[in-house]
């Protein structure tokens, strides 16, 4: 019984982290699906989202605004606004001029951008950890009072529900709206979409903006969940999210969700049963294994090599 | 057109404000357990406003500015010169290289201890960059975990000397070969992957090595690292004041000169110099051999190269292994120079710095890479007050290079034979 409860606890923790990873992974997978590049700076966009959210929350607190839903909503909107602007600007400055060149050139440009953004925040806000106030406290507990108890905090529920809402909204947007249809068309064939009168530059910008906005949501949620942020925390999270995107099949949006959940669960199982130190080893090992044996991921389409 | 430009310029200026003001203009300060928000000083706020105005003006007059930029004559006076004839060029390069090496040999005897130490570090980076240049520049494989091989070299020496008392000269080939073996073992499965996937897998590998080094405390000392790594000896002569090992003699006693701690520094510098020159020469020879040519062929067009009968795996594997070998070399020298190593020295940022050197110098070009290594290591030392901006500038430089000059500052010159013009 106790083992089972412990297992459920790890599962819940894993699903929470995993759904937040999925939100970041969307940015990788959509960009890769459309222009075939790894947006290495995406983790930094997420980190900037978290910083903006914290700045907004602290600012509102000093203004005396304390009504929780309002604080969270304003923080969310500000984080999304700043992150999306950042995503747009990064695409405009670093990726658009090198689009269509050899595959490694956009990637190196993206690595440069990632280093730049990390140090931009580092210089502006300092390198130390900053505490993120836990605005949502409390939760449910299950199990006998005298031994191990499984607990679900309200924060975890919030993360899960927010992710679900974002994912549903995104799927609806991609499948129903005019821009969403254009997105799908561009990802199938950029040249053809261009010929048919779709402004592909606009669609690519839109992809970056959507990805960055979702990363900002994840930044707010995970910042609150972990309780502290620093300029480097986007890097590892970005890699994890990229792993999730590859795991699910890069280019596929349901794949990103699935990959995120699998990655989150396997990570929390590793820290629960083995050692927290090795959870990064497990996720990178998983990434390497997937790329070696099934580079198309779980839900991805195989890529045909054309001559 | 003008109205559209104005709209676009206004939009860009607003975006600049949005991305700059919250992060730069509002600082989070920890006060006890509480986090408070503080406005930045006036200088920062004014410069953010100025930046927005500059962006606005630039976007407003973008067409005019771009047109007038295009009219400025090229800054590089050598750009339009006829290239030198092949034979003369090679002779010229040889003479220049010999002079450079002679100067580098004599140099440490005239300068301060600090600069010699720094120069040793530069040479280590030259070795690393030359090795990575084979992988990234010549073979076109983006390796983001190159620092892992550097770590393997350094830790091989540290561990062997700690547990078995092995000296520098034995550890040097061992470390390099072990790093090469790691390269071979890692390269074998991953080299089938496409370019950008390869980059991520190597990055993951680099991180795994670092995490393992950090956590295998029983072997590597974990985050505390390994200290007491011995200095290299010259034919059994030690450079310390007292002899540490039985049977060795001491350098200053054998030659009957006064003890000076500078001897050791200069000796290390000379070792690093010899090894760096060795690296450069070996790699230069490689590029002229069939294997080096096939690296470039595979980089330029994989399908064409394969249809001409090149084995993709063995060609890529050779590049990967040779790159790893020289990283192991550099790692051993680094361990011996520092006398202490810990996983802190082998983070991803280090890989990124080495990559930045290769990219800035011009992928594939040896002279370019050497100059870039010198610049990247020395410039931050010269401008100490800007040292915190170092990584910021690196990142920006990488982006700008890719946008404007992806071939690097000194692009590689192809080995080619020119047909004589008919009379």
Image (cartoon, coloured by chain):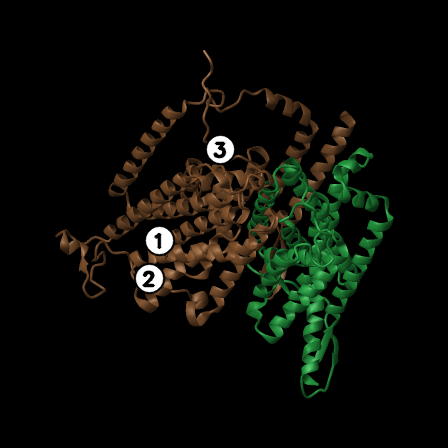
Q: Determine whether, in the image, residue B83 is placed left or right of residue A122.
A: left
- The tag on residue B411 is 3
The reply to whether residue B227 is visible in this rendering is no
The chain letter corresponding to brown is B
Q: Name the mark on residue A292.
A: none
Which one of the lettered chains is coloured green? A
**Mark 1 or mark 2: whose residue is earlier in sequence:** 2
Q: Nearer the viewer, residue A213 or B81?
A: B81
Left or right of residue A55, residue B306 in this image:
left
Above or below for B81 versus B227? above
- Chain of the residue that carries numbered disc 2 in the rendered image: B
Secondary structure under tag 1 reads helix
Report the residue marked by disc 1: B333
Rounded to the nearest whole Å, what is the CA distance between mark 3 and mark 2? 39 Å
Q: Are marks 1 and 2 on the same chain?
A: yes
Residue furthest to the right: A176
Q: Which residue occupies the extreme bottom position in the image?
A: A146
The quarter of the image holding the N terminus of chain B is top right
State yes or no: discs 3 and 2 in contact (Cβ < 8 Å).
Answer: no
Label 1, residues with CA under 10 Å away: few <14, some 14-19, many ≥20: many
Above or below: residue B151 compared with residue A205: below
Camera-nearest residue between A127 and A98: A98
Residue at left offset 49%, top offset 61%: B210
Mark identifier at residue B229: 2
**Label 1 vs 3, first from the N-terminus:** 1
């Amino acid at each position: 019984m106790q083992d089972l409860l412990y297992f459920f606890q790890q599962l819940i923790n894993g699903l929470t982290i995993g759904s937040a990873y999925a939100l970041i992974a969307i940015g990788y997978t959509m960009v890769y699906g459309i222009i075939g590049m790894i947006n290495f700076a995406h983790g930094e966009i997420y980190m900037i989202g978290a910083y903006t959210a914290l700045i907004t929350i602290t600012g509102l607190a000093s203004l005396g605004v304390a009504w929780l839903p309002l604080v969270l909503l304003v923080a969310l909107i500000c984080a999304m606004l700043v992150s999306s602007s950042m995503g747009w600007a990064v695409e405009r400055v670093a990726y658009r001029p090198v689009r269509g060149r050899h595959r490694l050139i956009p990637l190196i440009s993206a690595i440069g951008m990632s280093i730049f953004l990390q140090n931009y925040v580092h210089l502006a806000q300092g390198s130390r950890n900053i505490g993120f106030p836990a605005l949502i406290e409390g939760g449910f507990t299950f199990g006998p009072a005298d031994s191990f108890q499984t607990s679900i905090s309200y924060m975890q529920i919030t993360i899960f529900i927010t992710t679900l809402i974002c994912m549903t909204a995104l799927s609806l947007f991609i499948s129903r709206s005019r821009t969403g249809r254009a997105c799908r068309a561009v990802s199938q064939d950029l040249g053809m979409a261009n010929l048919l009168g779709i402004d592909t530059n606009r669609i690519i910008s839109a992809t970056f903006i959507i990805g960055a906005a979702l990363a900002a949501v994840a930044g707010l949620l995970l910042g609150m969940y972990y309780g502290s942020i620093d300029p480097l925390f986007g890097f590892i999270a970005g890699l994890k999210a990229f792993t999730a995107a590859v795991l699910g099949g890069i280019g596929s949006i349901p794949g990103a969700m699935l990959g995120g959940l699998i990655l989150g669960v396997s990570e929390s199982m590793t820290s629960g049963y083995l050692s927290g130190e090795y959870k990064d080893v497990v996720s990178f090992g998983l990434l390497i294994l997937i790329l070696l044996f099934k580079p198309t991921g779980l839900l991805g389409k195989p890529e045909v090599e054309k001559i | 057109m003008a109205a559209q430009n104005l709209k676009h310029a206004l939009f860009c200026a607003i975006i600049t404000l949005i991305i700059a003001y919250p992060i730069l203009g509002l600082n989070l300060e920890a006060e006890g357990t509480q986090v408070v928000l503080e406005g930045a000083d006036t200088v920062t706020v004014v410069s953010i406003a100025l930046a927005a105005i500059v962006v606005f003006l630039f976007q407003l007059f973008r067409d005019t500015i771009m047109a007038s930029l295009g009219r400025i004559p090229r800054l590089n006076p050598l750009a339009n010169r006829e290239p030198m004839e092949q034979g003369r060029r090679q002779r010229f390069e040889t003479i220049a290289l010999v002079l450079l090496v002679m100067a580098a040999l004599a140099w440490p005897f005239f300068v301060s201890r600090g600069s010699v130490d720094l120069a040793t570090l530069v040479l280590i980076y030259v070795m690393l960059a030359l090795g990575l240049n084979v992988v990234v520049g010549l073979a076109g494989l983006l390796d983001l975990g190159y620092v892992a091989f550097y770590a393997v070299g350094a830790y091989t020496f540290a561990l062997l000397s700690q547990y078995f008392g092995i000296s520098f000269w034995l550890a040097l080939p061992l470390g390099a070969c072990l790093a090469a073996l790691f390269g071979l073992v890692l390269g074998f499965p991953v080299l089938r992957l496409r370019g950008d996937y390869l980059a991520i897998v190597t990055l993951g590998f680099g991180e795994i090595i670092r995490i393992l080094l950090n956590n295998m405390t029983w072997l590597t000392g974990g985050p505390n690292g390994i200290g007491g790594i011995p200095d290299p000896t010259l034919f059994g002569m030690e450079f310390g004041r007292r002899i540490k090992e039985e049977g060795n003699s001491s350098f200053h006693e054998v030659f009957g000169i006064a003890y000076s701690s500078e001897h050791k520094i200069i000796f290390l510098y000379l070792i690093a110099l010899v090894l760096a020159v060795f690296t450069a020469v070996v790699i230069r020879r490689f590029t002229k051999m069939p294997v080096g040519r096939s690296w470039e062929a595979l980089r330029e067009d994989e399908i064409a190269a394969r249809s001409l009968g090149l084995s993709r795996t063995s060609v890529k594997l050779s590049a990967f292994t040779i790159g790893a070998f020289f990283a192991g070399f550099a790692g051993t020298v680094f361990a011996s120079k520092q006398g202490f190593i810990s996983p802190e020295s082998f983070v991803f940022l280090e890989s990124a710095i080495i990559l930045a050197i290769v990219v800035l110098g011009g992928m594939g070009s040896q002279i370019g890479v050497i100059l870039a290594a010198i610049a990247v290591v020395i410039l931050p030392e010269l401008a100490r007050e800007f040292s915190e901006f170092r990584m910021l500038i690196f990142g920006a430089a990488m982006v700008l290079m890719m946008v404007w000059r992806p071939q690097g500052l000194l692009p590689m010159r192809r080995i080619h034979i020119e047909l004589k013009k008919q009379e």
